[in-house]
Amino acid sequence: MAKLILSMDGLVLKEIPLTKERTTLGRKPHNDIQIDNLAVSGEHAVIVTILNDSFLEDLGSTNGTVVNGNPVKKHFLQNNDVIELGKYKLKFIGEAAPAAGAGGDKADFEKTMVLRPSTMKAAAQAAAAAGGGAQAAVAARQAAVQAAGQSAAATGIADKDAAKAPAMAAAAPAAAAAPSAAPAAKPAQPLGAIQLLSGGNAGKELELTKPLTTLGKPGVQVAVLTRRPQGYFITHVEGAVRPQVNGQQIGAAPHALKDHDVIELAGIKMEFFLKT
Amino acid sequence: MDLTQILEIATCTDPGMVRSHNEDSIAADAANGLVVLADGMGGYNAGEVASGMATTVIVTEMRQILSGSKPYQVDAKTKEEIAPKIVREQVLKANTSIYQAAQTQPQYAGMGTTLVVCLYYDNRMLVAHLGDSRLYMLRDGKFKQVTRDHSLLQEQIDSGIITAEQAKKAAHKNLVTKALGIDPTVEPEIHEYPTKPGDIYLLCSDGLCDMVEDDDIGMTLQALGANLKLAAEQLVQMANDNGGRDNVSVILVRVLREYPGTKGMMGKVFGWLK
């Protein structure tokens, strides 16, 4: 979707997606984009968006509309065009902006859509009528399921506006570069471990291979160590007292662990370290 | 019956790492034992509108009905409990609202939403769902999926075209076969299950289950079950750490105690009086 980035003196104020067919600009409050500045006319200009194309039209404003330094009456907006209204600048970012470029039409394929049963039924009935027989109907139903899967992307009945990243199986080359649909493989990161420094099991070592490891005594004090792409974090789970890291009680938010941090939890001290 | 002291509820919703806006919508009404999660679809901001309408309509309408009657009340005519009927009716009401808005306003054309609704009453849970948003349950350390997606993928698995393993890598995870607001009428799938104190229920949008393995979700609930709010945040964070390609929403419900309905004589008398 094309959008405008409103800025003044190089300061970005707002991003405005061009969702409507007509987006009006002006000083008066009924405009879609209101710019409260005396240099801007009440109804200054309008941007008409048809499919992927946007046109800017000056509505006979007092001070005129300037695009890329040239005054215009009517202008076919191109990617990165800068519209100037007084001190304000509006940068136009077209449909084929970088984000969309990566996905291209494959992104459509990834959006969630509703598959109407009626389309499948119609296909199944047509096939059944042609071939006859129960077996054919079953086969047709399956074929319809498959066909519908392939065609739904093209017909787009109700696409969930949640482009989930490039397709995988259908676009093998893209899949190699992009993360796959299954949870991404754990990035290579140093493995962390803790070694108990006090208590009955002092000296014992525990490798933190799982995404999360809980420590402590349930009902008394429990903390969780989470393994994330950014590293390891400790978070308080339950108990009146929060765990300490290097003698300091941690807050409610996850606390990032550094190599050789000393954790104290339920009366037991332990050291966190990264294995090489 | 006020269930505020019986159900512990934690929610978390996040746009994810890729999308700029959140089309998921969640609502929880602990007093009435009602939780609703919807994942909207449709151009620009229509998805948000659809999911928002679904949760608002269902919660408001249910609240009104439950203020005057009990879910386990028996209908005088049909001799059946009213719970499935009232839930179904409210889902249909939401369907009509969304469908009509989509028909009359061009910017909303084609919008729709998935839905999971859970109503807790009388030591039971009624779940109604449409589309690929899910309900999971953690009981006695076992984590399992309760609802079955209404999706092309699930149909293919059921008909034996592909295996569950292949499904994880399938390209068309995104096609749902049922949704709210797409057609003039819809038939939600409704089931009833007994609940046990200690159970944890997870309602989530596909932004979670597509990004995080079921095993990891189960492990998180088990490890962090003591702190429900943290568990909800942790799940969203895990989805985002794995790429967060869609909006992520979770609702966690823990049953703290038994909550039998006062059925028996009182309920029957009440039923007759109606």
Image (tube, rainbow, N blue to C red):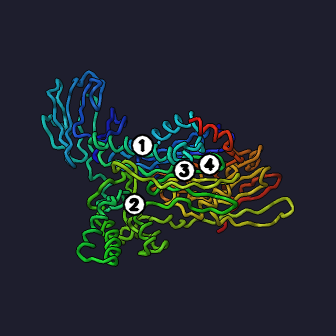
| Labelled pair 3, 4 in contact (Cβ < 8 Å) | no
In-front residue for pair A134/A158: A134
Q: Earlier in the sequence, mark 2 or mark 1?
A: 1
Q: Mark 4: which secondary structure?
A: strand
Badge 2 amino acid:
Asn
Do dots 3 and 4 share one subunit? yes
Do dots 3 and 1 share one subunit? yes
In-front residue for pair B87/A159: B87
Furthest-right residue in this view? A200
Q: Mark 1: which secondary structure?
A: helix
In-front residue for pair B135/B17: B135
Q: Earlier in the sequence, mark 3 or mark 1?
A: 1
List the residue tagged with mark 1.
B94
Location of residue A227 by image quarter: bottom right
Give the crowd class for mark 3: few <14, some 14-19, many >=20 residues within 10 Å: many
List the residue tagged with mark 3.
B250
| Labelled pair 4, 1 in contact (Cβ < 8 Å) | no
Q: Nearer the viewer, mark 4 or mark 1?
A: 1
Mark 4 falls within which chain? B
Label annotation for residue B174: 2
Badge 1 amino acid:
Ala
Mark 1 falls within which chain? B
Give the crowd class for mark 2: few <14, some 14-19, many >=20 residues within 10 Å: many
